[in-house]
Amino acid sequence: MTLHEFKQYLSQASELGFTLPNGQSVPAHFHITEAGVITKHFIDCGGTVRKENAVTFQLWTSVDTDHRLAPQKLLSIIKIAEQQFPLMEEYEVEIEYQQDTIGKYGIAQSLNGLELTTKHTACLAEDQCGITAVKTKVNLAEMTTEKTSCCTPGGGCC
């Protein structure tokens, strides 16, 4: 979800809550302790220099269980951040939240509000380091005519 999409969600929401990938909810009394832009400037294993930007929000909970962050309050925090960090409107949003260690999550809208989504590592230069794509084995006898219509007599594939 981009910051633009996140702001659209907040402008229509009556309350703010997050669900972790395991289905548990972030306690409703969370605070946003940081809002900013993270820039990752790196070189991949194939030698390509890359740069990624993300808007980041850090969620934190304390003992003040009556605290609730309203969507409009978060919008006002974002407005202040945008004055300091221009061009962040189309960056993806990342959420930092501590459980056993600080976790980084993506964010997506769901029927129940906002879900924190898992993030994964990947090789960005598979063609440079010998990784071959996994090929799916297909049993030709089980293929339907819909999937093979181009390879039927008169189908035009030959």
Image (cartoon, rainbow, N blue to C red):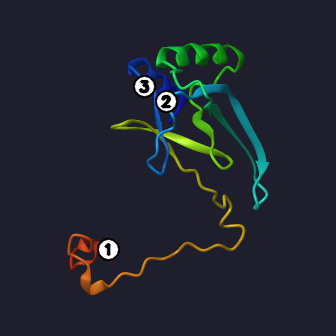
Q: Residue at x 49, y 22 (%)?
A: 7
> Would you say 110 lies left or right of 105 here?
left
Residue at 48% in and 18% down: 70
Tell me residue 141's x, y (percent). 26, 86
Q: Amino acid at mark 1?
A: Cys
The residue indicated by pointer 3 is: 9
Q: Quadrant of residue 56?
A: top right
Task: Answer with left or right where residue 12 lies relative to residue 147.
Answer: right
Is residue 27 positioned above or below 122 on the image?
Answer: above
Of residue 31 and residue 6, the one placed in the foreground of this image is 31
Amino acid at the residue labelled 2: Ala
Q: Which residue is mark 2?
A: 28
Residue at the spot 67% in from the left edge and 13% down from the top edge: 83
* SS of the residue under disc 2: loop
Identify the residue at image location x=42%, y=25%. 9
Task: Give the spatial CA distance, label 1 vs label 3.
Answer: 47 Å
Q: Position of residue 115 (x, y in %)?
A: 46, 40
**CA–CA distance between discs 2 and 1?**
59 Å
Q: What numbered label is drawn on residue 157?
A: 1
